[in-house]
Image (spheres, rainbow, N blue to C red):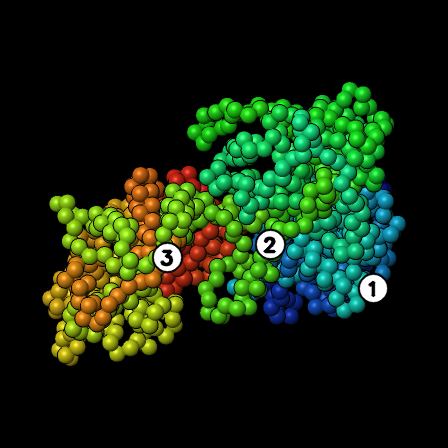
Amino acid sequence: MPMAATEAASYGRPAITPELAATLVAQRYGLTGAVTELGSQQDRNFLLRPDTGPSGASVGALVFKVFHPATDAAVVHDQVAAMTALASAGIEAPAPVAAADGTLVQRVALDGADHFAVALRFVEGEQLVDERHLPTHLVTGLASLVARVSRALADVPATADRETQWDLRHAATVVSEFAPAVPEDRRGRLLAVTERAWARVQQVADDLPVQLIHGDITDDNVVARTVDARPRVVGVIDFGDVVGSWRIGEVAVTLASMLHHDLDDHGVLRAMTATLEQGLAADDGLPLTPAERSALWPLVQLRCAVLVASGWQQLAVDPHNTYATTRMAHEWRSFETAAGLDADAMAALLLPREDADASTTEAPAALLALRGVDGGSPTPLSFAPDGDDAPSRLLLRPDTEALVLHHALARHPLVVVPQREPRVTSARPGVRPDRQHTYPLAAESVSRGGHELVTLSDAIVLSAGPGTLHVRIGAHRLEVADVQPSPAYVPGALLTAGESLGRATPLDQVSTHADGSTTTLEHARHHLRLRLLPASAAIDLPWDCPADLAPGYGALVAGTDAALGLATSGTDHAVDAASEQARRNAFLPDNTERYYARPPVFVRGWRSHLLDADGRAHLDMVNNVAAIGHSHPRLQAAVTRALGRLNTNSRFLYRDLADLSERILETTRGADGTSPYDSVVLVNSGTEAVDLALRMATIATGRRQVVTHAEGYHGWSTAADAITTSAYDNPHALDSRPSWVTVTDVPNAFRGTHRGEGAGAAYAADLNGVLDGLVDAGTAPAAVIMESILGNSGGVVPAAGYSVAMQEAAHRVGALTIADEVQVGYARTGESFWAFQAEGVTPDVVVCAKAMGNGVPLGAVITRKEISDQLGREGTFFSTTGGSPVACAAGLAVLDVLADEALQANAKAVGDHLAGRVAELAERHESIAAVHGRGLYRGIELVTDRDSLTPDAALTAAVCEALLARGVIDQATSERQNVLKVKPPLTLTVEEADSYVDALDEVLSRKWF
């Protein structure tokens, strides 16, 4: 081991207390003030906040650093030079402060040993090390800092001939020397990983650029401050590891420090290295060399190994070193993460090269063939998210893949699933997207009667064992699993073209159901996996990986499908979200509402989940249109059947329209079994329903004026938009209403004009005043319209008693009441089928849509014929798609499913459970001010403080983005955009609700977004 490291390990840290440090600072610098110790593994660092300077002037905080006694004068010189260089480059770093005698470096004697000491300007900010989650922008900001530091130090000469345990040029020696201090159950793995990583580095070591580096730009040694309401990395501290070493070591050290944190996914590391590479190459800087690219991940592994070994060694020397003790858990976690990721794959992931040689991964032509017992060839099967071979009804189960294969084998004796496609069959609900292993790293063949793998080219056996075979074919290595090779296949054996490599292994055919029960499947199944790799690839690669690692690992197995003769062109299942968004933005108007800064591309849905182009499941908490869940088979069957029989419009006579209308009226029956309504007019959307309802009211009453409520949204037609008062949807809404629209206050008892117990009566008094004013002005209203639950207020239930009082007030002046149930109707609130029923009112007109067709365009106006018949005074009416046979088939299927699957009761039970869980969260998270709504129409209101109820729109937006990375789709709502929508499909289960609340708890526990 290097001498400096040996000496450092034997001495322990300098023997100096905070009290002695304060005395020395007072003597040498003339400064007094509070002194506290900062962490360090070998030196001693003390924070001093001086009262005043020697002249009485205010002095900023300083760090008094006492070096380890083994530290050489040249080492101190290099550190001072590095800090000076960074300051000149505009990078915040500790700047040395001159002592009273004018020198920058002091000598102090402690326990008979001389130590160097310096006073440094303290860089204000917060360290990252103790934050479990680091947002992506913070991590890429750290990478940008590394690039700037590297460039600033490129021309600073290293004067110290320094050998230190932190210099990665000595990593293998350090680990070997310190290994005896590592617990035995971890020592073997530590040494094995170190040996393999060091061997890879040695292959390119002579070509790695060397310069002065900081050596420890980590989450411990950078500081962040809030800038423009976001945390940003602003500076670097602790120059104790400055050394002339490999430039790429600077990058490896920083990457290693990220591995114990909870990042959104491994793509963050890719963004980090891209930022760093761009920064290094800027202004004619030196970009990363091929040797540096090759060495990066092995050096990350070595850095983690050194940290583990050094930590245990430090505890052996200094058992009471609490700093080292507290670090061991996350240092081992970092090591396991680094060791578990293949170096070749990480090189392809983090630093992809456009000029990479494809010859080592891509097969030039078919090298292999799969043959069934009858000599037949396999049928390709696609498990891609947008493919048709995995029925939606089988998705998101523990046994999805087994069932899909079972159904495929009923049609084909031998099937093969390509390697190149993500598998929707591997989607896992309730699991973070970056932990759903949807990308296979092998092709898979399955048969019902047995099959074999045949080589089409000469091959050499590398190894064979139970269920495994490795052979060399040209420049490639073929790995086969679940195979039964011949006993004659020993290492070195030559296999000629046309020979069998082995037969597929039979598997038990058992399907496991969600309740834990099992079913034995009828087809015996034989299974075999294979992949083509570069000859130098590791032999312990995983068989699948998450999407964020697929660009790396996928590059190693890219030749697999071609080797089997499978088509590698045609449908491209990979979708670049940024490109797709740009394509959409090219023709959509700028005001089109969009979800997320970096949205996933969704290609499929099933029940309460959406599945993206990478095959990953996301819990859908906002799609109230899909009331009976996504892709319901009964809806699909009903619509398909209708499309195959008849699809016309309501001017023709067919039974479906009356069937649906009768079923809708049944849902409006009261306790006496009768319905107050006898007319249903079917339309194609909520906007059309609102527009038609307004027309009915004005014709029926002979009046034009309409009273609407503030903070309401009712649609986009000219009339519906006129009564829409949402300032979020239209910031000028209240100032731009036409003369025939009058706005009354929204009855929000939580944060409105009137609050608390008497709010309903107070809002009703306001409404009566508005109505009386209109009557007195000779413009008596035709109608008063309100959402039955105040959606744009955040899902707030109207103030108690207001709905009844509104109805009475409207009828008093001869106006009709219109209940907008477009969002909240159709069993969503749980207590009743229609939200207005729970309020004890009977609106004259009810409008609905969204859930009615579960995505098929369908809406309705429900009223009395005495009102709807008045339309005839202004001509005839029909809606082209509203009430068509296809729309009616969809509407009937939705009503059937709602009843047969008891989704209204589910909405109440799950909604109440969810609201209770969120109320418990509010006891720990001050930002949660309230949970609004009923059933599965909820709003979770977030505020900066509960006394003022100041809306926290920034937090709400950040939470939605953070939940997306946790596999939850949620969005902000309300005028103030500070309320989390909870409007999921009514199929949401208690377990899924718990998953949502758990994710919300984790996100709200973060310090930074």
Amino acid at circle 1? Asp
Amino acid at circle 3? Pro
Question: 324 left or right of 406?
Answer: right
Q: Around disc 3, counting alpha carbons within 10 Å, would you say few (fewer than 14), some (14 to 19), or many (20 or more)?
A: many
Q: Is mark 2 on a helix, strand or loop?
A: loop
Amino acid at circle 2? Val
Distance (Cα) linking label 2 and label 3: 28 Å
Query: Where does the image place residue 708, in percent across and percent down from the top left?
Result: 25, 68
Q: Is mark 1 on a helix, strand or loop?
A: loop
Q: Which of marks 2 and 1 is nearer the N terminus?
A: 1
For disc 1, the marked residue is 155
Mark drawn on residue 198: none
Q: Which of 688 and 103 is in front in this view?
A: 688
Mark in the foreground, 1 or 3:
3
> Residue at point 58% right, 45% down?
384
Mark in the foreground, 2 or 3:
3
Mark drawn on residue 857: 3
Query: Where does the image place residue 569, in percent across and percent down from the top left?
Result: 68, 50
Mark drawn on residue 575: 2
Q: Which of 761 and 948 is in front in this view?
A: 761
Question: 839 left or right of 645?
Answer: left
The outermost residue toward the left is 812
Disc 1 to disc 3: CB gap under 8 Å: no
Distance (Cα) linking label 2 and label 1: 43 Å
Query: Where does the image place residue 741, in percent across and percent down from the top left?
Result: 25, 74
Q: What element carries label 3?
A: loop
Q: Residue 750's image quarter?
A: bottom left
Q: Nearer the viewer, residue 807 or 198?
A: 807
Query: Where does the image place residue 357, in percent across and percent down from the top left?
Result: 80, 50
